[in-house]
């Protein structure tokens, strides 16, 4: 079964991470499939905007697959993995069509980076959001800090990043991370109605505004900043603090079962 589902609906390309049993954690398959799907959507004239979401109702994305990536021990081993997903998120951030993250559930670690790489974040309530990397001996390592500082007030972004806390959707809205939180029990329909209304204008209008937004960025400098973040995270990855924290997460599950 594919790790990423791709569909088209009313001008939207919908990319759904399809690993709900692992809370939609990102592995190499998701990375490769997402990069290809973004390129396809950008080139497809029937697509006006892109929605990124997760399968199930528990998690949008729980970040990197800690089980799969736990065998990466050194800086040299961690860097290619971080660089690979960093490239996917940079591609998403610089996409010529508007993008929206539909938070069907928790967005933690790299999941919060994936969401902030998108232009908008629409969420159901009763979910956790957090750049929790600091609690496992890391910083963001896929470009998330660069994207958060571009999209949010810097003190709010820094608070979310440095604390490494988990926030409710409502708290994340207060910080300017979240664009909209659904209110009705039928959150799915409400979210799609909101997104449909947000993107109701024609494709050239949507892509023109995206172009205006992109034109304010120095893309070379942006790429440099993302690369610095990835390199630094790879250095932290190799330290005991990170490996011990990941082992604690994996053992937590073993003790319960
Ligand atoms: C690598 C890049 C780095 C970055 O640059 O940002 C990162 O992303 S670091 C990774 C950060 N993520 C984590 O530390 C994992 C955090 N996970 C959670 O906090 C919770 O799992 C959740 C997302 C809030 C969901 O909670 P809940 O619904 O209660 O589910 P469980 O905790 O019971 O998990 C169910 C199942 O899923 C597995 N799982 C969850 N997250 C991951 C993950 N990131 N990678 C791999 N597997 C994950 C968990 O182990 C359980 O599996 P089983 O034990 O097999 O049932």
Image (tube, grey):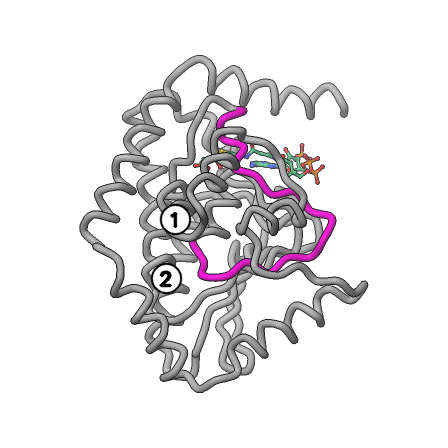
Residue 112: % across, % down: 52, 45
31 in relation to 99, above or below: above
Determine the image quadrant of residue 154.
top left
State the residue lying farthest toward the left.
220
Q: Nearer the viewer, residue 88 or 153?
A: 153
State the residue lying farthest toward the top.
240
Work out whether residue 65 can be spotted. no
**Residue at 65% across, 75% down:** 193
Judge left or right: residue 134 versus residue 55: left
Label 1 sits on a secondary structure element that is helix
Q: Where ligand 1 lies, by quadrant? A: top right
State the residue lying farthest toward the bottom.
202
Mark 2 crowdedness (10 Å alpha carbons): few <14, some 14-19, many ≥20: few
Nearer the observer, disc 2 or disc 1? 1
Determine the image quadrant of residue 132.
top right
Residue under numbered circle 2: 36
250 in relation to 29, above or below: above
In magenta segment, residue 133: yes
147 in relation to 234, above or below: below
Residue 115: % across, % down: 50, 52
- Start-end of magenta stretch: 117-135
Residue 55: % across, % down: 63, 56
Label 2 sits on a secondary structure element that is helix
Mark earlier in primary sequence (2, 1): 2
Mark number for residue 147? 1
In the rendered view of the protein, which quadrant contains the C terminus?
top right
Q: Are marks 2 and 1 in contact (CB under 8 Å)?
A: no
Distance, label 2 to label 1, CA atoms, is 21 Å
**Residue at 78% across, 67% down:** 186
Q: Nearer the viewer, residue 41 or 213?
A: 213
């Amino acid at each position: 079964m594919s790790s990423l589902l791709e569909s088209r609906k009313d001008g939207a390309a919908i990319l759904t991470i399809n690993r709900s049993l692992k809370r939609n954690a990102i592995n190499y398959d998701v990375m490769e499939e997402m990069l290809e799907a973004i390129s396809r959507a950008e080139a497809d004239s029937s697509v006006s905007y892109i929605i990124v979401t997760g399968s199930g109702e528990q998690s949008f994305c729980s970040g990197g697959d800690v089980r799969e990536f736990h065998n990466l021990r050194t800086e040299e081993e961690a860097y290619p993995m971080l660089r690979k997903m960093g490239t996917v998120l940079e591609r998403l951030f610089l996409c010529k069509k508007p993008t929206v993250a539909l938070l069907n559930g928790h967005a933690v670690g790299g999941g919060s980076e994936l969401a902030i790489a998108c232009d908008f974040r629409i969420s159901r309530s009763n979910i956790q959001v957090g750049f929790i990397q600091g609690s496992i001996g890391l910083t963001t390592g896929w470009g998330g800090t660069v994207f958060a500082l571009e999209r949010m007030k810097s003190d709010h972004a820094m608070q979310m990043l440095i604390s490494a806390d988990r926030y409710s959707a409502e708290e994340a809205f207060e910080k300017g991370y979240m664009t909209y939180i659904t209110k009705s029990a039928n959150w799915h329909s409400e979210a799609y109605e909101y997104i449909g209304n947000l993107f109701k204008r024609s494709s050239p209008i949507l892509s023109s505004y995206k172009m205006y937004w992109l034109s304010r960025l120095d893309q070379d400098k942006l790429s440099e900043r993302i690369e610095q973040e990835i390199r630094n995270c790879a250095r932290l990855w190799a330290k005991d603090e990170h490996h011990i924290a990941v082992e604690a997460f994996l053992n937590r599950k073993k003790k319960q079962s």
